[in-house]
Amino acid sequence: MKITAYLLILVIMALLILFDFRNIAVSTGFFHLNNSYTTVILPMVITVAFACGLIAGVLYSLIAAIDAKKTSFSQSRRVEKMSVDKDSAEMKIQTLEAKIQTLEVALDKALSDR
């Protein structure tokens, strides 16, 4: 899946570069808030917009990966704690069963001595 995503990004970048070189002479204008007019090369605007989107996507993916890792770590800790609690409960049960058997033997001995 990762390889497909990387190849898709490379294809999109190649198409963007091809589009930029074919339309290098095209320019567009922008009006600013103070009513000034600026002419900018269109492929440059497209490339900057693509780069910003790519950076935002990478940052979002990193944040999601870090969050997933934290969730996985907390889940594994919870499962480990449950396993330890289960083992501890089993040990308590075995100890109590041993005590009960000891008390039963003592009771039988006391009743037989009467």
Image (cartoon, grey):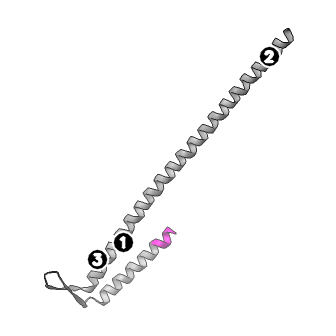
Magenta-drawn segment: 1-5
Instruction: Tell me how far mark 2 sits from mark 1, CA to CA.
Output: 79 Å
Decide if residue 26 is on the left or right side of residue 88. left
Against 102, residue 4 (above or below) is below
Instruction: Tell me how far mark 3 sits from mark 2, CA to CA.
Output: 88 Å
Image mark for residue 48: 3
Decide if residue 54 is on the left or right side of residue 37. right
Label 2: few (<14), some or many (≥20) within 10 Å? few
Residue under label 1, please give it.
Answer: 54
The secondary element bearing badge 2 is classed as helix
Locate residue 65, reporting x and y percent: 45, 59
Against 23, residue 82 (above or below) is above
Q: Amino acid at mark 1?
A: Leu
Q: Quadrant of residue 48?
A: bottom left
Q: Amino acid at mark 3?
A: Val
Residue under label 2, please give it.
Answer: 107
Instruction: Compare residues 90 and 46 and report the one nearer the observer.
Output: 90
Decide if residue 59 is on the left or right side of residue 113. left
Residue 3 magenta-drawn?
Answer: yes
Locate residue 28, reporting x and y percent: 23, 88
Identified at 73% across, 24% down, the residue is 98
Question: Which dot, 2 or 1, sits closer to the camera?
Answer: 2
Against 30, residue 5 (above or below) is above
Instruction: Tell me how far mark 3 sits from mark 1, CA to CA.
Output: 10 Å
